[in-house]
Image (spheres, helix red, strand yellow):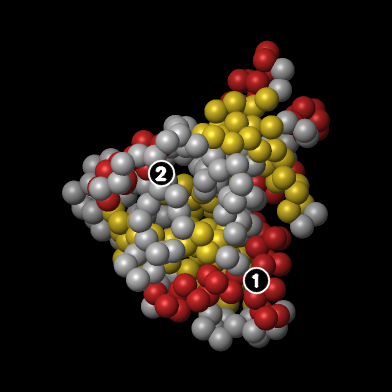
Amino acid sequence: MTNFSISPGKNNVGAYINNLDLNNLKKDQINQIKDILNMYGVVFFKKKNLNSEMYQNFAKSLGQLVEYPRLKGLENYPFINVLERKPTDKSVAFGGSFLHQDTSYLDKDRPRYTMLMSIEVPDDQGNTIFSSGFNSYNKLPEQIKEKIKNAKGIFSSAGPISKTRRELESRSGIKSAQIMEAEHSIVHEVDGQKSLYVSPGHLMKIKINEKESEEIKKYLIDHVNKDEFIFSYKWDKGDVVVWDNLSVMHKASEVKNCTRIMHRITIK
């Protein structure tokens, strides 16, 4: 590994990349970051404290930035979405309650990567919870693997997680757009590794025989929520985290009576 080292996260979910300057990346270092993402699903960079221009430039080094279809961008930086939690907010945090893969309801141009940078975080809450699609697929019984090997899922923006998105849209003065729906394979292959693509917050149905569809859906959602596949990441101010939406699910943990501000970019 050139100029930096990695340390795997809990349950082998994600990896910390240590001693790397995100402002002066060489092409081979960018390729190495992508290789680590392919292997671990998510990477963590501690206390980088980038300004908006630096943050957006780092994102551009990984791929093409995309505007999130449901939220406005930061002024002068349209690809940076502000996710703000205020002490007076009583609803579930945006992206909370349900593990999900971002915009799995898009037929095309789903983001490959999502990136978050912490601007303001509370000391004892506001973690982001990650679940590894690699590890959860590997631990499936062989008979389940066989049942879902060619199965498709129907994913919708009106799925159970939509409540948190509608609340954030309302605060931003945005009217909810039309419902988006897409069909994707439940099993994806990422750089030779098979991964579950379940996105519980958006999954409406699995297209297998009617008798087993709901049973398999519930089984897979329960499976990816098992503690053995989970890493609850504790943020420090200025952290930058990038994850692969094909192989990692995530959700926000509970936030109460405090301020939490994150800047998000999605990349394809």
Mark 2 — residue? 96
Circle on res. 254: none
Q: Which residue is more in the foreground, 97 or 152? A: 152
- In the displayed structure, would residue 15 be above or below residue 13? below
Numbered badge on residue 33 = 1
Counting from the top left corner in percent of width and height, residue 108 is at 61, 47
Taking the spot 34% from the left edge, 65% from the top edge, the residue there is 74
The kind of residue tagged 2 is Gly
Q: Is residue 135 visible?
A: no
How dense is the environment of label 1, judged by Cα within 10 Å: few (below 14), some, or many (20 and up)?
some
Q: Secondary structure at mark 2?
A: loop
Give the CA distance from mark 2 to mark 1: 27 Å
Q: Quadrant of the C terminus?
A: bottom right
- Look at the picture and state if 9 lies above or below 155: below
| Residue placed most toward the observer, 108 or 142 | 108
Residue at the spot 52% in from the left edge and 48% down from the top edge = 102
Given residues 190 and 63, the one toward you in this image is 63
Q: Dot 1: what SS? A: helix
Relative to 240, residue 126 above or below: above
- Tell me which amino acid carries mark 1: Ile
Quadrant of the rendered structure where residue 64 is?
A: bottom right
Neighbor class of circle 2 (other Cα within 10 Å; few <14, some 14-19, many 20+) is many
Give coordinates of residue 144: x percent, y percent.
Answer: 75, 29
Please report contact status of discs 2 and 1: CB closer than 8 Å, yes or no. Answer: no
Going by the image, does 252 lie left or right of 58? left
Quarter holding the N terminus is bottom right
